[in-house]
Amino acid sequence: MGPALREDEVRALGAEPPEPGDPRQVGPFVLLGVLGVGGMGRVYLGWSGGTLAAVKVIRPELADDPRFRRRFGRELEAVRRLDAAFTAPLLDAQADAARPWLATRYVPGIALEDAAGSGRPLPAEAVWRLAADVATALQGIHGAGIIHRDLKPSNVILAADGPKVIDFGVAHAAGLSQLTVTGQHVGTPSYMAPEQARTGQVGRASDVFSLGGLLMFAATGRPPFGTGSPTEVLFRVVHEPPDLSGLEQADPYLRALVERCLHKDPEQRPHAAEVAAAARERAAGTAWPDPLQERIEPRAALAAKASGGEPAALSGGETSVGEGDGLPCRAPVPAPAPRSRRRLVLAASLAAVCLAGGGIAAGLLVRHPETTAYTAAPVATHPSSPAVHAPSGAAHQGGAASSQTQPAADSGGWNPGSGGAAPATVPGPVAAQPAPAAPAPADPVPAQPGPSPAGSTAAPRNPASGCTYYSGTAITQYGDAGRNVVQVQCLLRSHGYSLGHYGVDGRFGPDTRTAVEQFQRAHHLTVDGIVGGDTWRALRA
């Protein structure tokens, strides 16, 4: 058993001492301090079994709303099944408790709001890394049938192994509760999509709009539609073009990408997959700036220390919240490999602590304003005309704001790093090109010979014989990462399919999905790019 965390160490992890009336325990989690207070409830720093967590306890008035409880339970079931890269996973939850609660893994890092604010914008190469990883997170979130609805700088945590998206999947429940009434919508004005501000309707394209605003903030330290009252900001979101000054100097290609994400028409925005693919080309090997990494490392070390023992709860009020076991806990999700030697050393140190203490805490929810309801009525258009028109003299970006949900992520798209000057008019999506026939030389799995010529007496080759990374049949799809993806990639290569430049890298990206679709088409399977039971069996045949 390790020593208890001191109060100054709890503060260093971003938490404040509890107030009278705060519980000392929620479910299996001992509460160490308060991380934040917002519209949905209070968020505590919790500890259980060597793992730190951000534990959100729902407000009593929301807990008393039957509509909220029903939606909250359904959203939790979706989030519990989510296994997306660059997200803080759900550890445990109890939707039927007297005060519903959920716990996500604590990520030791710095909120983007803090990292890029106060005149400290990130360099362009770090923004490209942020774009690639957050867009990858959105692919996984959307693939699970979840819309974030409130993606903003305070909901993205910059950790040593990459950014983590937090607070997804629960805002929808709040949107159907007494938290919102007629004319009000859940979200943050500076990052809310026009269709969300006008009608409250959201889709995948709404999250991409928020991503564009988030990237603008990361690169310049300010939101794209300025500051002011919620009504003023929402009017600009709906009627006026974003102020992208400063992005051209930082990176003209980044400006072009952000401009596409912030298009008024949801159908003209890129898919999250397009953003991830375009950004990854320019983000390869990028590490966080040293000043930012120096702020992250002490928090990571302190979180590792907390995983080595059983810290005592700070003094509080009632003893516990909730009854029963709640939802089952999930196994830890492996983090992506660090991107520089310095990060590799840090990762090795944390792994050593993990082995000695029974697991490292990951997952951070720092103090931040939570989702808030804002009145959208002043922004509403004339009831007889749903189209949104910019005021006279203002630049118009794409016509009527649509509330249509964006289609599933696509692997094609414009690559802002393809050379040449940034286009004055950003082109629309480009169809994905077929994967090249030749395998990538960097692929660690050697290509296997093709089928034997007619009449050959060679024994049939079993493609699975050299691929022993994963033996299950869990659904594996775009945005996933881990051993199951390595197994899919290995089997595809064994069948002679190209995985493009990155080869077998354990990440389900555009090239892997293209190869899966080609395999499915050749084997007369449903062509959806998703590796389910039938595709697993065919790959191993």
Image (cartoon, grey):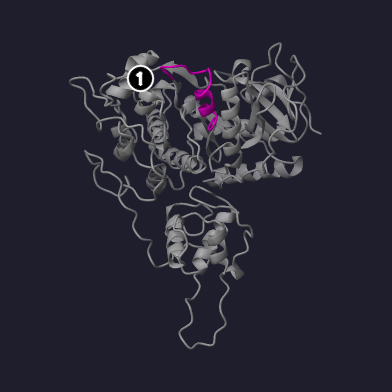
- Residue sitting at the far right: 1
Q: Where does the image place residue 436, in percent across and percent down from the top left?
A: 37, 64
Figure quadrant of the C terminus:
bottom right
Figure quadrant of the N terminus:
top right
Q: Where does the image place residue 210, in percent across and percent down from the top left?
A: 41, 31
**Residue 254 versus residue 453 in the image, above or below:** above
Q: Residue at x 55, y 45 (%)?
A: 338
State the image quarter where residue 440 is shown: bottom left
Which is more toward the observer, 302 or 63?
A: 63
Could one spot residue 295 in this view of the protein? no
State the image quarter where residue 8 is shown: top right
- Image-based side of 188 in relation to 297, left or right: left
Could one spot residue 466 in this view of the protein? yes
Secondary structure under the numbered disc 1 in the rendered image: helix
In terms of secondary structure, what is the magenta stretch mainly?
A: loop
Q: Residues within 10 Å of mark 1 (few under 14, many from 20)?
A: many
Q: Residue at x 58, y 55 (%)?
A: 484
Membership of 309 in magenta stretch: no
State the image quarter where residue 121 is shown: top left
Residue designated by label 1: 234
* Segment colored magenta: 167-184
Which is more toward the observer, 100 or 335?
A: 100
**Residue 47 versus residue 42 in the image, above or below:** below
- Image-based side of 135 in relation to 307, left or right: left
Q: Where does the image place residue 104, in percent across and percent down from the top left?
A: 62, 33
Identity of the amino acid at label 1? Leu
- Image-based side of 273 in relation to 154, left or right: left
**Residue 493 versus residue 473 in the image, above or below:** below
